[in-house]
Image (cartoon, grey):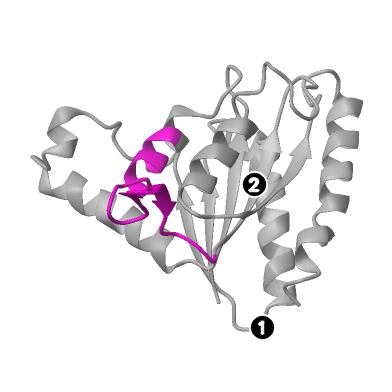
Amino acid sequence: MKLLHIDSAATGTGSVTRELTAAIVARWEQAVPGLSVTYRDLDAQPLPHLTGPVLAQVDQAVAEAGEQAMQEFLDSDVIVMGAPMYNFSVPSTLKAWIDRVAVAGRTFRYTENGPEGLAKGKRLVIASGRGGIYGDNSPADFQEAYLRQVFGFLGITEIEFVRAEGVAYSPQHRTDALEGAKAAIAVPLREAA
């Protein structure tokens, strides 16, 4: 089994989502013997944003980096993604990565019956970090709703969130939110064992 571990937080070692993704991946490694893990840090090595020259593959190195990101995604059985809420959505580096894996003819296609996701059979576990408290289905949530939509469009139906909210309220809120999120990690792993 192959797991793709993605971090996108710009806050380095102080990142809530980086701490959560590390804990999630560690639990998967304990639960799944022989698990192969590929790591991608979108803050340390961001992909360029999608532009005309990027689409035209003017720069061979940029084109190869995009293809490598696509191949890592296609090869994975499980994706563990750190997705902090930045300005009600996701970091632009994560959006740039999504633009590389959401490609017509590779991960989705249009048919006479509408769009069809081609990335079926994958499992996605998203570590969601939020400074405030939004709960489920908040009209201010363009983070989790967006991620559900885009990956559902690609055919991924097993999407789970491990959420830490209110981490900016106080040090105690942060500690409590992280403890609660880490306690929830075991839920996605029950089926993996």
Q: Is residue 149 above or below residue 66?
A: above
* Mark 2 residue element: strand
Q: Is residue 80 above or below residue 16?
A: below
How many neighbours does mark 1 have within 10 angstroms: few (below 14), some (14-19), or many (20 or more)? few
**Which quadrant does the C terminus fall into?**
bottom right
Q: Residue at 77% x, 66% y: name it.
A: 189
How many neighbours does mark 2 have within 10 angstroms: few (below 14), some (14-19), or many (20 or more)? many
Residue type, mark 2 in image: Ile
Q: Could you tell me residue 146's position as x and y percent?
A: 55, 32
Q: Residue at 66% x, 23% y: name it.
A: 141
Left or right of residue 103, residue 186 in this image: right
Judging depth in this view, the residue of 66 and 16 nearest the camera is 66
Task: Report which residue position mark 1 lands on.
Answer: 33
Left or right of residue 92, residue 3 in this image: right
Left or right of residue 64, residue 147 in this image: right
Q: Could you tell me residue 78's position as x and y percent?
A: 57, 63
* Mark 1 residue element: loop
* The stretch drawn in magenta includes residue 5: no
Whether residue 46 is visible: no
Q: Residue furthest bottom?
A: 34
Q: Quadrant of residue 163?
A: top right
* The stretch drawn in magenta includes residue 106: yes
Q: Residue at 16% x, 49% y: name it.
A: 61
**Start and end of the magenta stretch?**
95-121
Q: Residue furthest left?
A: 58
Q: Residue at 66% x, 83% y: name it.
A: 33
Q: Residue furthest front?
A: 112
Task: Report which residue position mark 2 lands on.
Answer: 126
